Image (spheres, rainbow, N blue to C red):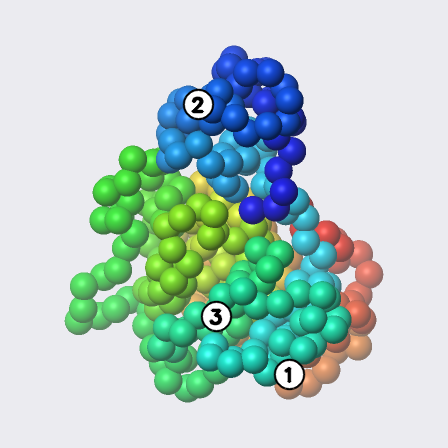
Amino acid sequence: MAQLDWAKIQRRLKELGFAPGPVDGIRGAKTIAAIRAFQKKYRLVADGIVGNKTYRALFGKSPASAQSVMTAAHLVAIAYQLDPRKETDGDTRLDREFGLHVTKRCTVKGVEAYMLNNETLLIPGSNSLADYLRFNLRIWALGTRRLTFREEAKKQKVDKRTKLGFSRTIWHQGFLRHANKIHHWVGKNPRDWPKVIVGHSLGAAAAQILSKTWAAPAIGFAAPRPRKSHGKIALDGLSLSICRDDDIVCYLPSSFHRTGQSMTLRHASPKSGLNHDMDAYIDALNNRKPGLGIPQIWDP
């Protein structure tokens, strides 16, 4: 979590009828007690920690959640040069170009994800055919028990509409399984949850699910469709999917839907090919047709 303005939080708690003690900018016992009381009232985990969900409940947005779309594109492109078990040239690029470094690397089989020191979670897409078969093609989990977040949500005294992706909807089973593995890797401590999520391809599908899981803004490039049912679900407005009009992957599975806001990216000079990798998306962002409405900053 970014540095919090405790005086601002104390003033907001007072406005809402809670008693944080004097507005002195200090996270003291009275302030913690007021936060817990607020969390109980709004059916959040009453741990006294002002994480993304509590901050959003207080102010309507996550702390320091704004993210440059172009920066997000370059970061997730660099993620393909990172390695789960060692430093690479990608780590050098992160430091040289953005002053960032990886604080945690996912070593779960078939899953790549990287947490940065600014609390951005990067989720690249499939790096092998095996990963593609394991997740992208596992739409219904036929012959096995269907995975949901319902069981885990029932065990927790929180709002079941938001926790762990629970939303009374039908998810693409492979995408959900992938997101679930990342969720377990990050852990249950709110202090470890990302402030922003950026994904590409398979990672963009996971970003849509995990955005509402952690109440964190997300940007997904070349985003496939992870949800069978249509219509709005809790917190789906936090997710932005950017899809090239000539990238067929974005329109699969054909009977499924994306969550949150989805925007079409059109290159000013259309090019042949699949146009699915991040180089193609960065090229299109730099040379896009005017009037598409794609924001420079994503700050839902």
- The front one of 175 and 58 is 58
- In front: label 2 or label 3: 2
- In front: label 1 or label 2: 2
Q: Is residue 120 above or below residue 233?
A: below
Label ID, residue 33:
2
Q: Residue at x 28, y 55 (%)?
A: 148
The reply, left or right, for residue 176 in relation to residue 269 is left
Q: Is residue 176 above or below residue 40?
A: below
For mark 1, does the 10 Å Cα neighbourhood hold few (<14), some (14 to 19), or many (20 or more) residues? few
Gap between marks 1 and 2 measured at Cα: 46 Å
Amino acid type of disc 1? Asp
Q: Which quadrant, please, contains the C terminus?
A: top right
For mark 3, does the 10 Å Cα neighbourhood hold few (<14), some (14 to 19), or many (20 or more) residues? some
Q: Which residue is mark 3?
A: 105
Q: Secondary structure at mark 2?
A: helix
Q: State which quadrant residue 277 falls in.
A: bottom right
1 and 3 marks in contact (CB < 8 Å): no
Q: Residue at x 37, y 73 (%)?
A: 108
For mark 2, does the 10 Å Cα neighbourhood hold few (<14), some (14 to 19), or many (20 or more) residues? some
Q: Which residue is mark 1?
A: 89
2 and 3 marks in contact (CB < 8 Å): no
